[in-house]
Structure formats: C-alpha cells, structure tokens
Amino acid sequence: MRIFITNFYHIRFFKPNMIPVATTGSWPYWIYQYNNKKKDTYFLDNNNVMIGIKEELFHPDTLDSKFEALEEKCGESKPCPYLDKVPHCQFMDMYYNYLKEQDFNYLLNEFERVAKEVKLINNYEGEPIIVLIVYESNKCKCAERPCIIKWFKDNGYDLIEWSEELFKEERGEIF
C-alpha cells in the first residue's frame, strides 16, 4: 500500500485502486451534485472509485472548538493576514501539535482496513493506493496539507503529492 496527498479536483483522474480519503470535515457538495448523489453518502463514481470516505483522525469535531479559541482566526478574511507567519501561525501550530498526539500506526492500520473494504466493494486490481484529500492545491503553503506532510515525515513516511505525471514516469505508461 502506498499513500499520497492531493486535492479534490484530481479525484476525476483516479483509478479504482486509488482510494480517496478526505482529511476534511466533509466532502464538497459539487462532487455529490455532479454524480447526482445525496450529500455525505458513499458511492462508486463513473471510474469505479469509492467516494465519501473521510478519516476522522484528521478532523474530529473536538478540533472545531480549538480553532474557535485561537486569537488569529484562519479564513475570516482573504487574503489571510497571517501568511507572513506560515508555517507558524496559530492555526498551523495548533493543528500540527494535534497531529503529533495521534497514533500514526493506528492510522496505517486503518488505511489497510479501508483498502480491504473498498476492494470487496469495487474489486480493484493492483496495489491499493490511499490518497489523502485536502481542499487546497499544493501551491498553498498554509492550511492542513503542510502539517499533514510534516507529520508523516516525522513518522518516517515521505508523503508525495499525487499527479498524473508521477504515475506516467513511474510506470512508463499513460495512466
């Protein structure tokens, strides 16, 4: 099993063995709207990719109260007035410290379990690929993505950005 990270936009290019796992509180409405599905449900999209899985470890309800308690309110104004503090604005420091308290091995075991369940549903072929999904593009230097990448690195795993080009180069074929 391999693990990557990308944003919701790229799911349209996934293959059935690629399992998008949202790190956010919810999936965006437009994915459900496009597929004519009820929000917050699980379903297979036109590419036989399982949609709707999210990992609560990355966004439990208890985090909302911690975010609200911060003096620097993330996302209240655009552009963010705290960009000059990245990667040490209150939000990123709090989120990263939260991740450091989590059990990385538990998360890997959970991904293995999810991969087996998805295989029972869509019968994918090949190695399971977990792709952590965030809202922001990889050009965004703030938000959850850098914190998640750093936490994985702290645990000995280089979390690479998923791209079509990466798979083309790796396999020597068009993916």
Image: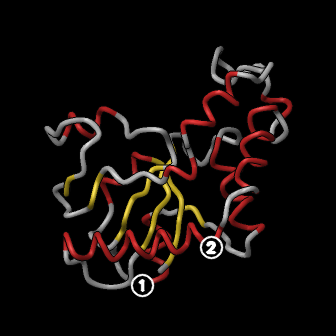
| Residue at left offset 19%, top offset 64% | 48
Mark 2 or 1 closer to N-term?
Answer: 2
Residue 157 got which mark? none
Secondary structure under tag 2 reads helix
- Give the class, few, some or many, for how many residues have Cα within 10 Å of label 2's Cα (few <14, many ≥20): few
Residue 20 versus residue 172: which sits nearer the camera?
20
User: Residue 89, how many percent across, how many down?
Assistant: 82, 33
User: Residue 134, how many percent across, how many down?
Assistant: 51, 46
Q: Is residue 97 above or below residue 32?
A: below
Residues tagged 2 and 1 counted as in contact (Cβ below 8 A): no
Residue 59 versus residue 173: which sits nearer the camera?
59
Quarter of the image where one finds residue 153: bottom right
Secondary structure under tag 1 reads loop
User: Residue 36, how many percent across, how many down?
Assistant: 13, 38
User: Residue 33, how many percent across, how many down?
Assistant: 21, 33
Separation of residues labelled 2 and 1 (CA atoms): 32 Å
- Which quarter of the figure is the C terminus placed in? bottom left
Which residue is denoted by mark 2 in the rendering?
Answer: 105
Q: Is residue 21 above or below residue 33?
A: below
Which amino acid lies under the numbered mark 1 shown in the image of this protein?
Gly
- 95 vs 71, left or right, is left
| Residue at left offset 32%, top offset 50% | 52
Residue 35 versus residue 137: which sits nearer the camera?
35
Which residue is denoted by mark 1 in the rendering?
Answer: 172
Which amino acid lies under the numbered mark 2 shown in the image of this protein?
Asn
Quarter of the image where one finds residue 40: top left
- Give the class, few, some or many, for how many residues have Cα within 10 Å of label 1's Cα (few <14, many ≥20): few
- 24 vs 49, left or right, is right
